[in-house]
Amino acid sequence: MEGRSGIGPITRFDASGYPSRPAGEIDAFDPAGLPGRLLPQTDRVTQLALTSASEALRDAGLDPAVLPEYAPGCC
């Protein structure tokens, strides 16, 4: 949205063994919206997925509490 690319060199791990090293990384992620007990039990990718699903529900104006059990899905 600022008109600049989010692609740059990989910084989260040593990518020197890969033929291509540019990537789009999520660097400013705060899992503060997740329950504290989940943080030590989940990896970063799971935290990103849970946060993304929560934000998608909020953006859609859906409240999972009022939906039938097992009705919503996420993939």
Image (cartoon, rainbow, N blue to C red):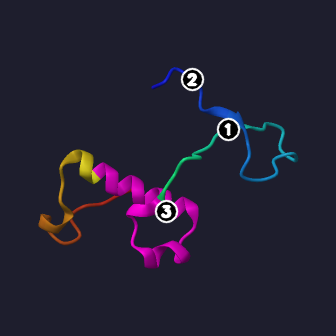
Mark 1 neighbour density, 10 Å: few (under 14) some (14–19) many (20 or more):
few
Magenta-colored segment: predominant secondary structure = helix
Q: Earlier in the sequence, mark 2 or mark 1?
A: 2
User: Pointer 2 and pointer 3: residues touching (CB < 8 Å)?
Assistant: no
Quadrant for residue 51, please give it. Answer: bottom left
- Up the image or down, 69 lies above or below 18; here it is below
Amino acid at the residue labelled 2: Arg
Amino acid at the residue labelled 3: Gln
Q: Position of residue 35 (x, y in %)?
A: 39, 72
Mark 3 neighbour density, 10 Å: few (under 14) some (14–19) many (20 or more):
many
Can residue 9 be found in the magenta stretch?
A: no
Q: Which residue is more in the foreground, 17 or 40?
A: 40
Q: Position of residue 54 (x, y in %)?
A: 33, 57
Residue at image point 24% right, 61% down: 72
Q: Position of residue 56 (x, y in %)?
A: 31, 49
Magenta residues?
31-56
Can residue 46 be found in the magenta stretch?
A: yes
Residue at image point 40% right, 67% down: 34
Spatial CA span between label 2 and label 3: 26 Å
Q: Which residue is mark 1?
A: 23
Q: Earlier in the sequence, mark 2 or mark 3?
A: 2
Q: Which residue is mark 3?
A: 47
Q: Which residue is mark 2?
A: 4
